[in-house]
Amino acid sequence: MTEKVVEPVIRIDHRGPLHGTVRVPGAKNSVLKLMAATVLADGEFNLDNVPEIVDVDIMSDLLRSIGSQVDTGSDGALRITHSGELSTSIPADLAGRMRASINLLGPLVSRVGKIEIALPGGDDFGLRPIDMHIAGLEAMGATCTFSDGVLTVHAPRLVGADIRFSFPSVGATENLVTAAVCADGVTTIDGAAREPEVADLCRFLVAMGAQIEGIGESTLRITGVPHGTLHSVSHRVVPDRIQAATYIASVAVAGGEVDMIDAQRNDMQMFLHRCTEMGLVFTDLDGIGVRATAPERLRSVDVQTLPYPGVATDYKPLVIAMLAVADGSAVVTENLYPGRFRYVDELQALGANIKMHEHHAEIIGVQRLSGASVIAHDIRAGAALVVAGLAADGVTTISGVGHIDRGYDDLVGRLREIGVGITRG
């Protein structure tokens, strides 16, 4: 008889303010792209401040599947070594587990001239097309075909091109930058994404020997260099601004004061601005982090998601969890992924007063939520349910914990360090 696998759950039974210090780990949305970009050069790459999350494990397996060597060290260290030929085919079972597998597209096409990859998986919150990736590669001379769920890209020789985005896609920006660094000539990307994680990737590539101008701006100019010019480097992954926001949301609903070491205030200014309007106070910690102090009760404010430097869509579930116990009513508008509201039903099960109007959510704050059993359907939704559980009377039980593990490095342990009554089992 096959032994039944018992899925873990998170249980929250909390009342009272939070206090203490929590360290913000490296960014999921940066490290996965850095790992993919190492494919561009032979040698030994050393990444530091790597979060211990499931998606890093999946990307490690993806790299091993194409012939790379990946070794995990202690305390957030990761060593990736490339030498010789790499496979051009990405296993469908691995690609289907994580959307960031698509970030191997640019580096592998640049290095090998071909890639076959099944449409990637990851969080399921609506259509996230890769048309912009394909159009950009075709502008650079690649031939792209799609059959039976597999994308095949041939590009024996990439050439520089002028690319204009109608929307600042993070993934397309990252893929086309990595494809362009060794293309013949100059590539410009107008309307590029400006997220801190995109800038981190560009700085990593420059350290490898790439020539990129306009880092952090909406127009990037990449001058291609010969493949032999690029070399392996050591790099520290930028802190995760979404994890920092999760700790901010936690103290916001529970009360108290928490120091977040390595939190980068400049990377989340618009989110912090909205939190300040809600009553939170932020204090710089002499360049090593940020202190968040909660008000007696949050105030309701309207929020809309926008490309960086606006409020990111990844913040939105946390914002709605905060507004669920704020004084007054507010409207949250999703401008990027209109279908990303699956967690609202779960928040309503906890007693949140939320009314949906297409891509708008109207939240009428209540004093306290009530514990219940809920399901995490994606990474950020899971974190929002944890935050909501801190504002609930009674026990909140969260299943679907595997989604949270994809993007959070020991969320339960870090919250316990600042006084949250939370267990996993």
Image (cartoon, rainbow, N blue to C red):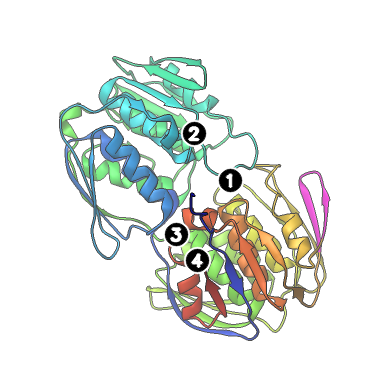
Say if residue 386 shows up in the picture: yes
Q: Dot 3 corresponds to which residue?
A: 240
Q: Position of residue 8 (x, y in %)?
A: 53, 62
Viewer-side residue, 414 vs 252? 414
Q: Which mark is residue 244?
A: 4
CA separation, marks 4 and 3? 6 Å
**Local crowd size for mark 3, using a 10 Å CA cut-off: few (<14), some (14–19), many (≥20):** many
Residue sitting nearer the eye, 112 or 332? 112
- Amino acid type indicated by mark 2: Pro
Q: Give the overall secondary structure of the magenta segment.
A: strand
Q: Is 110 located above or below residue 209 in the figure?
A: above
Of labels 1 and 2, earlier in sequence is 2
For label 4, count other residues whose C-alpha is less than 10 Å away and answer few (under 14), some (14-19) or many (20+). many
Q: Are marks 1 and 4 in contact (CB under 8 Å)?
A: no
Q: Which residues are magenta?
A: 354-363
| Sequence order check, earlier mark of 2 and 4 | 2
Of the two numbered discs 3 and 2 on the same chain, state the one appearing first in sequence.
Answer: 2
| Residue at the disc numbered 1 | 307
Rounded to the nearest angstrom, the CA distance separating label 1 from label 4 is 19 Å
Q: Is residue 123 above or below residue 135?
A: below
Q: Is residue 202 visible?
A: no
> Residue at position x 52%, y 70% from top?
424
Question: Which mark lies nearer to you, 3 or 2?
Answer: 2
First in sequence: mark 3 vs mark 1: 3
- Distance from disc 3 to disc 1, alpha carbons, whole Å, reads 17 Å
SS for dot 4: helix
Whether tag 4 and tag 3 are in contact, CB under 8 A, the answer is yes
**Helix, strand or loop status at disc 1:** loop
Disc 3 to disc 2, C-alpha distance: 23 Å
Instruction: Give the residue type that dot 1 points to.
Output: Pro
Which mark, by number, is residue 120? Answer: 2
Which amino acid, by three-letter code, is at mark 4?
A: Ala
